Amino acid sequence: MTDTNEPSVLLSFPEPGVAELTLNRPSATNALSLELQTLLSKYFTELANNKDIRCILLTGGDKVFAAGGDITSLIDADPIEIYQRHTERLWAPIEQCPIPVVAAVNGYAYGGGCELAMLADIIIAGKGASFCQPEIAIGIMPGIGGTQRLVRAVGKAKAMQMALTGKPISAYDAWVGGLVSELCEDDDVYKQALANCRRIARMPPLAAEQIKEVILAGMDAPLASAMALERKANALLFASKDQREGMEAFLQKRHPVFSGK
């Protein structure tokens, strides 16, 4: 828990269709304790089944996103204990969330914080943010996607350098390397992230879910297989009411109202 006895993750609904999850351990730079991971997992599970939610905004606040795992709970752990924690089960609802996720990153996104940010579909980062996989410096290695998702985001050369040296990279380098979607002033991060969420929330949710699913499923598939997934998903959307609404609104020169059906 935080020093103020508030939950380690805060849930709010800043706009229609948008849920906001805020990591809330400021005195511990939002270190990812098991309690925080469990609560975050619980919220993602609930939101994934909430038909009114069309986008999720994930933030650590305006100072820090998350500065890694909670080392105090790791230093005396043995291999069996680490294995039996099954943190992959806690992260599964985030990884498998069908709803688009936008991360607003200020300050440090280190270790588990970087791995958490990489689970988002869009990362909006402030110019003062930095990303790092420093686990090697404490005798371990990334364990929740920091080697596998990182190499898919920035390529082998940059991923190797980050994981083997533990050296942080700037938000600018993360943006150039393809890890970050959009770079902006630190004070504008939340506003830009919310603007992305607002726009996504206005889009047809079935189309958004299919786009996310096909991009993620197709990333590691042969191009021909990925193209087949895309064709079938596109055809499926022609059975939706939102397809008709979107095209009629376009022809009638009005704003569409999507129902998610």
Image (cartoon, grey):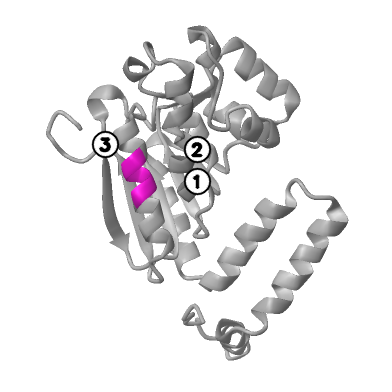
Q: Is residue 50 above or below residue 261?
A: above
Q: Nearer the viewer, mark 3 or mark 1?
A: 1
Q: Position of residue 55 (x, y in %)?
A: 44, 60
Q: Earlier in the sequence, mark 3 or mark 2?
A: 3
Cα distance, mark 2 to mark 1? Answer: 6 Å
Residue 60 image-quadrant placement: top left
Quadrant the N terminus occupies: top left
**Distance between the Cα atoms at labels 3 and 1?**
21 Å
**Is residue 40 inside the magenta stretch?**
yes
Q: Main secondary structure of the magenta part?
A: helix
Residue at label 3? 24
Residue 209 rendering spot, x and y as whole percentages: 57, 64
User: Does label 3 or label 1 sit earlier along the sequence?
Assistant: 3
Instruction: Please provide the residue range marked out in magenta.
Output: 38-42
Quarter residue 136 falls in: top right
The reply to whether the C-beta atoms of the residues labelled 3 and 2 are less than 8 Å apart is no
**Number of the label disc, if any, that sits on residue 157:** none
| Residue drawn at point x = 61 percent, y = 58 percent | 212
166 up-or-down from 208: above or below: above
Residue carrying label 2? 88
Could you say whether the residue bearing mark 1 is in a helix, strand or loop?
helix
Q: Nearer the viewer, residue 76 or 177?
A: 76
Q: Are marks 2 and 1 in contact (CB under 8 Å)?
A: yes
Residues packed near mark 2 inside 10 Å, few (<14), some (14 to 19) or many (20 plus) = few
Q: Amino acid at mark 3?
A: Asn
- The answer to which image quadrant residue 239 occupies is bottom right
Residue farthest to the right? 224
Residue 165 percent coordinates (x, y): 60, 10
Q: Name the side, left or right, on which 2 lies relative to 125.
A: left
Tag 2 secondary structure: helix
The residue under label 1 is 92
